[in-house]
Amino acid sequence: MKLSDAEQARVVEVFSSLQGEGVHLGQRQVFVRFGGCNLHCDYCDEPGTIPIPSGDVWPVHKLKARIEELAKERPHAAVSWTGGEPLLHAEFLQKVMPWARERGLKNYLETNGTRVSELRALGALCDVVAMDIKLPSATGRQTWSEHLEFLRVVPEKTFAKVVLTDRSTEAEWRQVIRLMQEVSTNIPLILQPATDFAGRGPIAPALCLKFFKQAQALLKDVRLIPQFHPIWGLP
């Protein structure tokens, strides 16, 4: 009998590590990396997860067993549902997110911020939503309207992250600030210079600091945090 989308998903890997990005930097989490993404960012540090399909088919019982195995080895604060784009597997997440909470693990969703209807279905199950704001210079397409609606779903649980490359422009940055102002100036905004190995060069430091100061003048919580996984030598 064929399993439904609620009972299986394509998973690339499941592992324990420290959160290397954003406002929960350094927190021990179980990472569940799903296969498949609806975008193709030129700085992606997990390009193997982009093709649809990618990863192996995992039934829900296999994933639960692996998470429990890792959780027994040491304490974890959360499960990071990442990818790829985890919201491509929304039915599966509706089944496993409540289970994770029952075991004392928070649900930390890492997402490209474009799958609005899926977030509406899962918002109550998320404890943290780490949402990327994707710049057109990195994706080759405009996603501002999707991001605006996405940020409005669970703003009290969300922080936004922008990866900045040597192609990021001042016009794009002004649009990021306008986007944040339209939803809430209280949502944390993280500036993350692209990592050298990720396919694009990082933004020039002087321009990054200029963007940082511009955002600080208009928003309440702005932070400049590089990606720490490559610095720590962790997956």
Image (cartoon, grey):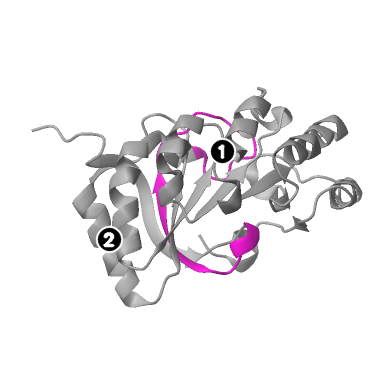
Give, as a single range, the part of the protein colored magenta: 22-47
Looking at the picture, how far across and down is residue 61, in whole percent? 19, 53
Extreme top residue here? Answer: 141
Q: Which residue is mark 1?
A: 112
Q: Is residue 90 above or below residue 222?
A: above
- Report the residue at 67% width, 23% height from top: 142
Q: Is residue 45 magenta?
A: yes
Whole-Å distance between the Cαs marked 1 and 2? 25 Å
Q: Which residue is mark 2?
A: 66
* Label 1 crowd bin: few (<14), some (14–19), many (20+), radius 10 Å: many
SS of the residue under disc 1: loop
* Label 2 crowd bin: few (<14), some (14–19), many (20+), radius 10 Å: some
Left or right of 219, for residue 132: left
Frontmost residue, 206 versus 223: 223
Mark whose residue sits in front, 1 or 2 = 1
Q: Is residue 13 above or below residue 88?
A: below
Looking at the picture, how far across and down is residue 3, in whole percent? 16, 36
Amino acid type at circle 2 is Arg
